[in-house]
Image: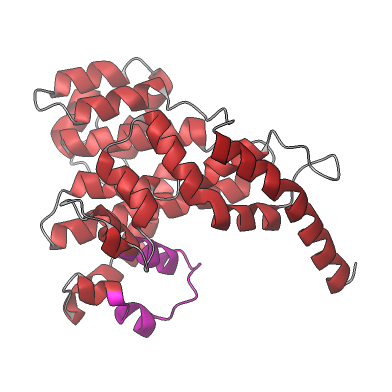
Amino acid sequence: MTTSSSACLFEEELAAIRPALEKKLTLGEVDLPLLPVVAHQVLLLSGDPNADSSKLSALIQQDQALAGQILRIANSPAHAPRSPIVSLQQAIAWLGLNMLAGLAFSVSVQSWVFKTTGYEQAVRELWRHALATGLYGKEIARRIRHNVENAFLCGLLHQIGQPAVLHVTSSIPPLDGTRHSWPVLEKLFEEFHVQAGVALGEAWKLPEPVKETIRYFPDHLYSQANSPTRGAIITCLADHLAAYALGTSELCEETLRNLPVVQDLNFYPEDMTALLEQKESIQHNVECFLS
């Protein structure tokens, strides 16, 4: 197939899907995936000032597969326990309540929302980037003394609109009768992921700083965000660092160091050096989540 014919097929498929997707999102004619029950309850618990470790432990134990995965991650080299962790209470004591809540939420969301038949490897890459962004968000938040768990959640969900778009397009019949091409889906992600992410954020009743981050994290928009958590600007830089760490960025290190967002965070060269030096650690932590 020639390049011109491939381009024609791309535009033809895009033109066939775009109006249907836009209509569904604009009119709210979408059956969005539900936030997993445990993830929703963890989200509520993390915002409860009276929450304690026993409540979180009891919640995670409702899902034995989730509990097993949490223990596996807690025992991984990324968290370096002094001795094997065999219970959720031990995991909470070692990792902390907020860290474990973040793990439980992310694992639960991955297990349900990022499961899509036919696009497994591509969706895995979306999740890898989301995790890396969340992890970098925590490191940036630490450097500016902001809430690290909020930064993790903002980074983890900043592009949740992408799997939401994938979910909605699955109800639109493909032209060839098999499935939509991934390049077309990527173009639709670019155009509609914010709109879909905002809709999903409302449906899931996500915290306001997270919904604001979904809207405003890109370079040219974060100045419009006004949440004191600074989730949008933190996530903007975390998104760039995640792409760099995972080898998907078009930016070289020098360009990355001189992004406007770096200046707007009042970061010094040594701040960026410290973040860039965490590349291998972030990669390793991401793989611990995915393995």
- Residue 80 seen in render: no
Q: Residue furthest front?
A: 27
Give the residue drawn at x 42%, y 25%.
Answer: 36
Q: Residue furthest right?
A: 1
Q: Nearer the viewer, residue 109 or 22?
A: 22
Q: Residue furthest bottom?
A: 254
Give the residue drawn at x 30%, y 71%.
Answer: 276
Residue 115 magenta-drawn? no
Q: How is the image coloured?
A: secondary structure
Q: Is residue 81 left or right of residue 103?
A: left
**281 lies above or below 42:** below
Q: Is residue 248 left or right of residue 3?
A: left
**62 lies above or below 177:** above
Q: Main secondary structure of the magenta part?
A: helix
Asked which quadrant contains residue 175, the reply is: top right
The quarter of the image holding the N terminus is: bottom right
Residue 183 percent coordinates (x, y): 69, 58
Give the residue drawn at x 45%, y 43%.
Answer: 197
**Could you tell me how many numbered marks the image carries?**
0
Residue 181 percent coordinates (x, y): 74, 51
Residue 240 magenta-drawn? yes
Q: Nearer the viewer, residue 19 or 146?
A: 19
Q: Give the magenta range.
A: 237-260
- Residue 197 seen in render: yes
Asked which quadrant contains residue 243, the reply is: bottom left
Residue 157 percent coordinates (x, y): 38, 45
Residue 142 percent coordinates (x, y): 15, 57
